[in-house]
Image (tube, rainbow, N blue to C red):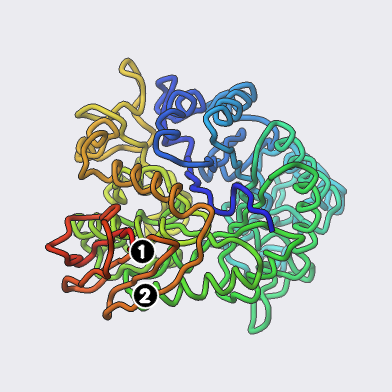
Amino acid sequence: MSRTWWQDAAIYELYVRSFADGDGDGTGDLAGVRARLPYLADLGIDAIWFSPWYPSPMSDAGYDVADYRSIDPAFGTLADADALIAEGHALGIKTIIDIVPNHCSDQHRWFQAALAAAPGSAERARFWFRPGRGPGGDLPPNDWQSIFGGPAWTRTKAPDGTPGEWYLHLFAPEQPDFNWANPDVRAEFEDVLRFWFDRGADGIRIDSAALLTKDPGLPEPGAGPSPYTDRDDVHDIYRAWRTIADDYEDRVLIGEIWLADAARLARYLRRDELHAVFNFPYLCCPWDAAGLRAVIDSTLQFHAAAGAPPTWVLSNHDVDRHVSRYGRADTSFGLDRRDHSQPVDLDLGTRRARAAALLTMALPGSVYVYQGEELGLWEVEDIPDERRQDPIWHRTRGADPGRDGSRVPLPWSGQEPPFGFSPPDAAAQPWLPQPKEWRELTVAAETGDPHSMLELYRRALRIRRAEFVPAPPLTWLPAPGGVLAFARGGVACVANLSAVPAGLPPHAAALLASGPLAGGLLPPDTSAWLRLH
C-alpha cells in the first residue's frame, strides 16, 4: 500500500479561541493564526487540526454549531479561512477541520424550525422529539443522562407557554442531537463534507464519532449494548463518508472514538470507513513502563491487523495537560474523574513531559501535538469561578472542574498578560486568564534556549521527520525494569520511567535527550534517541 501524508504526519491541534488574537477582542481568530503560520512551519508540523470555527453561541466552545458552512464572525470570514488554507499549503501544512455531526446548536436553523413546528412534523423528525412520561408528560421520555451531567432531555414550550415535547441532547441542552435515521440529516452532512473538501480542506476530524445513531425504542441503558454508543448502524454513515473522501485526492477521515473494546474500535478502520482514530488508551495511561509497553504493543497489533496507521497523543482540549497529570501522585487520566485536588509537582511533571514527548514521537504512525504542550504549559487549576465557561463545570455545580484549564490562551512574548496573545493596544483581556508565571514559558522566552521545551520539540520534530518517516518498524530492545527501549531503523529510543539511573545500550552517538545524560547513564524520567552502530 502506498503511503500517504497522514500515515506518519505530525499534526498540531489548534484551538482557535486560544491561539492568537489578531483584532484585540481577547478571542483568538483566523487573522491571528495566519500571522503565526511561520511559527508552526518552523516548529516542524505537517498539518493543523482546527477546533470548530463555525458560527456558534459558544455554549460549548464552538461544539454547538449554528452553521456548518460559515465562519464565526469572532474568528473571521470564509475568505479568511480560504486564505488560511492556501497559505498553509504554501508552507507545506495541511488543514484538518472539525465536523460535529452528533448535535448542532439550538440556534441552528433546523432546530429553530423544529421548535416552531408541530409534533410529528418533518422538521422535528430531524431531531429526537418525544412526549414525556407520567401525568401531563412531566417526566422525560427515559432516564438517559447527559455526558455533561444532568438529564439528557429538555422540555419545550408551545407558543402559548404550555409545556410541550422533550428533545434529546447527550451533551448540553443547547446541543440537540440529530436523528441520523432521517435522510435529510445524512444528505446535509454529506454536502457539508463536499463543501469543505472543495475549499481545500485535507481532512475531517469527526467529533463524538461513535454516538451518532440511537436505538429508536430509546430503551434504558442495561447489561446489553448501549442504546446510543457504537451501534452497528453508525458504520453505514462512515462508509458513505469514505466514498465522498475517496472522490478527492489524499483526504483523511479521523474519528474521535472512546471505546474500551479494541475489536469494536477496529471496525471503524475497515478499508471502506475511517482512515484513523485517536489513541485514547495511550493518552490515559499512567507514567508506568509496563502499562505503556502494553498499550504500545496492543496499539501496534490492533492497527496492523486493521491495516491502519497508529496515532499517538498526550493531550488535547478535553483533558488535563500532561505536564500537570505527570506531576500528580496518580498520573493516569479519565474523563469521568478529573481530580484537581491532588498536589502537582510541576518540575517532576515537566521532566516527565519532556521524556514522554521523545517516547511518543519515536513511535510509528502519526503524532498529535496540542497547542501549548510544545511550551510546557500546565493545567490552570485556579481559574476564578466567575471566569469559567465550560458547561461541564456549570452542570456539575463545580464537582467536575471541567476543561477550561487546558484552553487558556497561549503566551507569545512579554512579561505580563496577555503575553502577546493580543495586540499591544488591545482593550479586551483574554477570554480566560493566563497565569503570570507563564512569563517564563512564552515563545519568545523559549526560542533559542537549548534547554527549553520549545527547542526540544523543534529538534525532535526535525529528527523525527528525517529518521522515522517513512516509518521503519519497531523492534523492542532488552532493558531493565522500568525502562522502555526500542529501535526503529538505525535509531534507538530509550525511556527511563524507573526511580534509578539506567545504562544505555551501545550506540555511536546521542541524537537528542530530554535531559542531561549522566556519564553514560540515563537518569530517571528521561528519554534519549541514540544513533546505533
Label 1: which residue?
A: 492
CA separation in Å, label 2 and label 1: 9 Å
The answer to whether the residue labelled 2 contacts the one labelled 1, judged by CB atoms less than 8 Å apart, is yes
- Callout 1 amino acid: Ala
**The quadrant where residue 210 appears:** bottom right
Q: Which residue is mark 2?
A: 477
Residue 54 image position (x, y, % from top left): 61, 35
248 left or right of 470 in image? right
Is residue 159 in view from this perspective?
no
Q: Is residue 203 above or below residue 343?
A: above
**Looking at this view, is 529 or 22 the one in front?**
529
Q: What residue sits 37% from the left and 75% below the top?
A: 477
Q: Is the C terminus in the top left, top right, bottom left or bottom right quadrant?
A: bottom left
Dot placed on the residue nearer the N-terminal end, 2 or 1:
2
From where the camera sits, is residue 17 visible?
A: yes
Name the spot of residue 273 as percent of width and height, x first.
73, 60
Q: Amino acid at mark 2?
A: Leu
